[in-house]
Amino acid sequence: MEGRDRRYRFAIARTVAAGIADGIIAGVRDPDAYAAALAGQVRGVAVAAIIDPGGIDLRAIRAEMEYAVDRLA
């Protein structure tokens, strides 16, 4: 499990770092920390949806997450 989690975070961090290098992404200072924070957010949403499926609007959350990622550009 730990290895998969590290690979997941590494893939996110690598993508963010490439975006920073290309000038596509601004506003991220530490791609590794960003990857950990994003992975944690995604997990938190997943747990909330399991605990209270009727109380979580996954479409609205996805729209907000897409907006947040778009703001990095």
Image (cartoon, grey):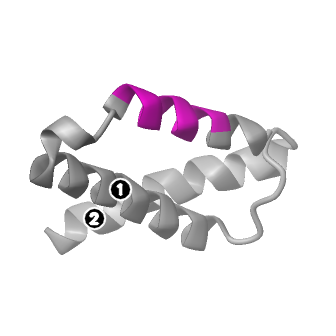
Q: In this view of the protein, which residue sits in the foreground, 13 or 68? A: 68
Q: Is residue 48 left or right of residue 50?
A: right
Question: Which image quadrant for residue 60?
Answer: top left
Q: Is residue 44 left or right of residue 34?
A: left
**Label 1 packing within 10 angstroms: few (<14), some (14-19), many (20+):** some
Which residues are drawn in magenta? 59-67
Marks 1 and 2 close (CB-CB < 8 Å): yes
Look at 78% across and 45% down and name the residue there. Answer: 25
Kind of residue indicated by mark 1:
Tyr
In this figure, which residue is indicated by the disc labeled 2? 5
Expressed as whole percent of the image width and height from the top left, the position of residue 22 reads: 83, 42
Kind of residue indicated by mark 2:
Asp
Question: Which image quadrant for residue 2?
Answer: bottom left
Q: In this view of the protein, which residue sits in the foreground, 16 or 41? A: 41
Q: Secondary structure at mark 1?
A: helix
Expressed as whole percent of the image width and height from the top left, the position of residue 52 reads: 15, 48
Q: Secondary structure at mark 2?
A: helix
**Residue 6 lies in the magenta stretch:** no
Q: Is residue 61 left or right of residue 21?
A: left
Q: Which mark is residue 8?
A: 1
Expressed as whole percent of the image width and height from the top left, the position of residue 10 reads: 45, 61
